[in-house]
Amino acid sequence: MEEAREERKEKTGARHPAHQATLFLEGRLGKEGFQSPRLPRECRVAVAGYALSQPEEHRGEGVFTLWPRTDEEGRLTEVQVALKLKRPMEGPELVVHGILLHADGRRFVVLVQPKSGEAFRLVLGRARGFTAFLEPRKAYRFEGALRGGRLLAERAFPLGKWVLARKGERPLPEPIEGDRNPHLEGRRGKEPAPGEAKPKERPEEAQRPAPAPPGPEGPPKPPKEARPPGEGRPRRDPVRVWRAPEEEEAPGGLGLPPPLPKGQVMGLVGEGPYYLVLRPEALALWWPKVERLLPEFPRKYEVRWYPDGSRAVVAWDLEALKVWYKRVLRG
């Protein structure tokens, strides 16, 4: 039972640490504040964390951990000085744990959830030569540096695999750097990154003859509207779907949603497809938030209304539904 629970945690990402962003920078912290020759002049500086609660232990010269913020172009605009490292810095200058929201030929936009406080977005420029494709809505660990006042990403790791390696349960995953993402190799049906050329056609596909045009003697297929009723493929799920704004009101005969645990008015249920079910008692508080975030759901989904007043968001990707549901809960 314990092994099954651990395996389930691994699959659902429950082992992921709180997302964070840290910049390691040399400087000096004194009564007048923090100073570093590498910070841009227009960058705002504040003191936080242990450097604020235990100032005497962190004053002086050394390498400090800073929590960065950027503008939409990736320029460093604000840092909070957290603490001074007791040992010399090892490893990358910039570390970001977060969910990738957007990637193009110039930058990455990452959602960062601190251990406390509100989430924020960090924009990382692509370092020279880093053109590998990263999947949006996936959690990554980025490593990089501060150059010319901008935070640059130099390589990345899938966050879940990196965490398991840090715990000693798996070897360190291959880094995503340059133009190569080893974690996507061999997976078919993936679109190339924006700006990248599509993969070359396979030799056997190039040699395959083109389909011959239909002969004149073949009878034309009847249009869909002329086909007899019941000829189409039946739905796997008999429950009808309400799709806004095609129907103003929910159709009748919807059946009932999967039951929630006793006393629960909202939650995830189902074994495929998976449901986020809201009982009538939860609609006033939570449904506006669900509707507002529905356009950001990254996978195929359906919205269903039921005669008893319940509503549900139905999806076939459990991980995507869980990540999106957390955003709903955070409001």
Image: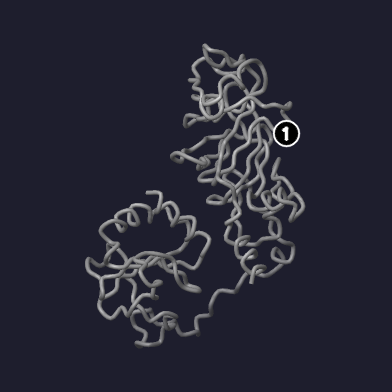
In the picture shown, does residue 80 fall above or below 281? above
Please provide percent x and percent y for residue 246.
Answer: 27, 65
- Whole-percent x and y of residue 33? 53, 15
SS for callout 1: loop
Judged from this view, the residue extending furthest toward the right is: 171
**Residue beneath disc 1:** 91
**What's the coloring here?**
one colour
Residue 274 image position (x, y, % from top left):
46, 69
Determine crowd level at label 1: few under 14, some 14-19, many 20+ residues with C-alpha closer than 10 A. few
| Residue positioned most to the top | 32
What's under tag 1, amino acid-wise?
Gly
Residue drawn at 45 percent across, 39 percent down: 117
Q: Is residue 268 left or right of residue 190?
A: left
Q: Which quadrant does the N terminus fall into?
A: bottom right
**Residue 267, located in which quarter of the rendered image?**
bottom left
Q: Is residue 235 left or right of residue 203?
A: left
15 is higher (above) or lower (below) than 214: above
What residue is drawn where x is 69% and y is 35%? 129
Residue at the image point whose x is 57% and y is 18% from the top: 39
Q: Tell me the residue at 69%/69% (across/down).
A: 208
Within the image, what quadrant is residue 288 found in? bottom left
In screen coordinates, is 301 left or right of 65?
left
**Looking at the rendering, which quadrant does residue 307 occupy?**
bottom left
Please state the total of marks drawn on the protein image.
1
The location of residue 141, given as percent across then percent down, is 63, 43
